[in-house]
Amino acid sequence: MALRGLRLTPSLTATQPVVLAQRAFQRQVGAMAALQFQQQHRMYASNRDQQGKQVLIRDHGVFANYVPPEQSPSITDFGRWRLTKWRNLKNGVQNMLSVGLIKYKSQYEKWDSRKFLEVAEETYKDMNDAFARGDREVLEETCLDSMYSTLKNQIKNRGSARWEWRYHGEVEAPKIVCVRCVGTTGLSKHGFAVAQATLRMYTKQSMAVYDKKNRLVGGDPNKVHNILEYVVFQKTISDPEDMWRVYGKIAAPEKVQQQ
């Protein structure tokens, strides 16, 4: 990238031109990144616009849909084994950098992975319970727009049937497998910033469906199933009033291969 408009005077030391060039390059890269992010995220007008504020739509898409495979390929299949190792390493480095960026940009609530896992697990259970009961108010609090719309339509289409969902504990503790953070101001602490975290949720659940006469027409309340899901949570960390909500789900790697 050419650096235009940069003048070096005779009074500068030997290291100053390098420093100035680096700063100019960083400013240009930051400006291009901010412009690209703004072009990819639509904005809508509201009454706040009259006060000089802009409101961004919360649906930004999944920043990264990669999750590690449940079983690593055998080293005898060296090509797949090497590719899987490289992808896991790349994802791990991006996770580490994103967590650092979240900690840096979170002005209102510092990142705590243990606390996040507790909040995310409770949000996940509240979402499933509210969906079974048809409680749209709780769903709107626990889910973001696209997920809420999907679940609301499913509730509408199931008619008068009554669903009963129960949580029976964990098969394995929830695990963070992917973290990403995107903002419009580069490394500045200020400005719009969104964080997403994908959790591996492996839990014990049961589901039963009853008709209007309370007859069992689907599922079994006494049969517990082990359910593995990858759930994406999102939070606008630049908004002091926002909280972690369910953005959506990602298919497990094995399911993707089967399709």
Image (cartoon, rainbow, N blue to C red):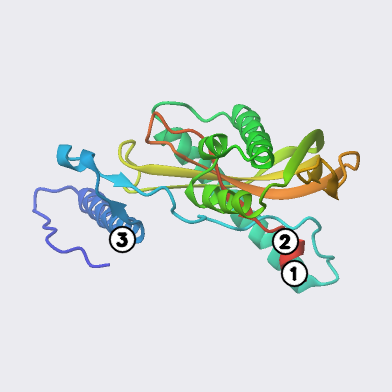
Task: Quarter of the image for the C terminus: give it.
Answer: bottom right
Give x and y (percent) for residue 104: 42, 34
| Quadrant of the frame with the N terminus | bottom left
Q: CA distance from mark 2 to mark 3?
A: 31 Å
Q: Residue at x 40, y 29 (%)?
A: 241
Q: Residue at x 78, y 46 (%)?
A: 211
Residue in the image at 40% along x and 35% along y: 105
Q: Residue furthest right?
A: 222
Q: Is residue 5 left or right of residue 144?
A: left
Cβ atoms under marks 2 and 3 closer than 8 Å? no
Categorize mark 2 by other alpha carbons within 10 Å: few (<14), some (14-19), many (20+). Answer: some
Q: Few, some or many C-alpha atoms within 10 Å of disc 1 (few <14, some 14-19, many ≥20)?
A: few
First reached walking from the N terminus: tag 2 or tag 3: 3
**Disc 3 secondary structure class:** helix
* Mark 2 lies on residue: 253
- Please tell me in which quadrant of the rendered image residue 176 appears: top right
Q: Please state which of residues 173 and 43 is positioned toward the viewer in this rendering.
A: 43
Instruction: Tell me the crowding category of disc 3: few under 14, some 14 to 19, or many 20 or more residues within 10 angstroms, Cα based.
Output: few
- Where residue 47 sits in the image (x, y, percent)? 21, 40
Residue 121, above or below 148:
above
The amino acid on which the numbered mark 1 sits, given as a three-letter code, is Gln
Residue pointed to by mark 1: 257
Q: Amino acid at mark 2?
A: Pro
Q: Please tell me in which quadrant of the rendered image residue 70 appears.
A: bottom right
Look at the numbered discs 1 and 2 and tell me whether their residues touch, using CB distance below 8 Å: yes
Q: Which residue is mark 3?
A: 39
- Which residue is drawn at the image coordinates 76% and 39% (left, top)? 165
The amino acid at mark 3 is: Gln
Choose the circle earlier in sequence order: 1 or 3.
Answer: 3
Camera-nearest residue between 83 and 218 = 218
